[in-house]
Image: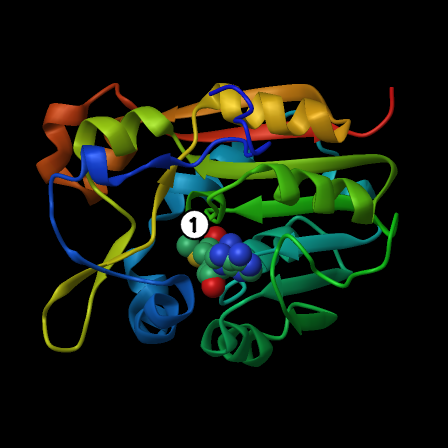
Amino acid sequence: MPVGAAGKIGGMEFSGFDARGYRTVDVRTGYAEWVGKYEDTVEDVMDLALLERLVVPEWTSVVRAADLGCGTGRTGQWLRDQGVLAIDGVDVTPEMLARARERGVHARLVEGDVTATGLDAEAYDLVISSLVDEHLADLGPFYREAWRIAAPQATFVLVAFHPHFIMTSGMPTHFTNDAGESVAITTNVHLISDHVAAALAAGWRLAELQEGLIDDAWLAVKPKWARYRDHPISAAYVWRKGA
Ligand SMILES: C[S@@+](CC[C@H](N)C(=O)[O-])C[C@H]1O[C@@H](n2cnc3c(N)ncnc32)[C@H](O)[C@@H]1O
């Protein structure tokens, strides 16, 4: 999607693709309710399997990482398992941060927005964000904030829902609440070209792009998704600051 008149990048309305019609709540409300069951429902094959496939980031040489939209610390835990020792996390939902605090893999946890983190400028040689961007209406401020906190030569790894899957399935990010109701959390559709436009405008250059398909590993955890076999469901972008 081109940069709009107001300078907004991405954030196509999800409602035009919605095949579920679930009641929709905002990010904080949704994750505050989902937190207890979040880790039982999010599938590692969505994001962690893609991180495993990346060839560019040298995880073991990362000195300091910023984990934007850190949630309960899944992404941070994965980084720790790769040998990344200093990780700061930012998230807008206090209940998710409380779980991350219990987990204890982050050096520092900050309640804040991924577009205005308050973290130090040029302080991180890795910025990472997994499964967050679909909640943002505008990718521009997100890529600019990642750039601001990234050290010279830093890498920005962003794992996202693939726009094709949101469009073709008509499924928003959602969870089942304690009453058994399916509840959607505000979802936006960002085309791959939206990511490229926002990243290039912020100064990033693309180093690697991986797409995750519905494959045997997926069908083992979601047998009902056989009709989506070979459809792309996620994407991992690796951006570089500097040459
Ligand atoms: C699907 S979870 C991902 C958490 C973690 N990265 C993972 O992979 O498990 C999305 C997280 O992003 C957070 N989030 C969404 N929009 C945000 C924003 N604008 N600023 C900060 N956090 C945000 C939510 O509170 C939630 O914890």
Please tell me which residue is depicted at 74% across the width and 27% down the height of the picture. 204
Of the pair 132 and 25, the residue shown nearer to us: 25
Q: Position of residue 36 (x, y in %)?
A: 33, 75
| Viewport quadrant of the C terminus | top right
Crowding at mark 1 (Cα within 10 Å: few <14, some 14-19, many 20+): some
Q: Is residue 45 left or right of residue 86?
A: left
Q: Nearer the viewer, residue 105 or 160?
A: 160
Q: Is residue 193 left or right of residue 24?
A: right
**Residue 124's x, y, as percent?**
82, 49
In the rendered view, does 157 fall on the left or right side of 126? left
Q: Is mark 1 within 8 Å of ligand 1?
A: yes
> Could you tell me which secondary element the residue under label 1 belongs to?
helix
- At x 54%, y 74%, the residue is 97
**Residue 70, visible in the rendered structure:** no
> Could you say where residue 22 lies in the image, as x and y percent from the top left?
14, 55
Above/below status of 176 relative to 178: above
Question: Of the residues shown, which amino acid type is indicated by label 1?
Answer: His
Give the color scheme: rainbow, by chain, secondary structure or one colour.
Answer: rainbow
Label 1 belongs to which residue?
135
Is residue 239 visible in this depiction of the protein?
A: yes
Q: Nearer the viewer, residue 69 or 60?
A: 69
Total numbered labels placed on residues in the image: 1
Instruction: Name the residue at the front extreme.
Output: 5
Residue at image x 46%, y 20%?
Answer: 1
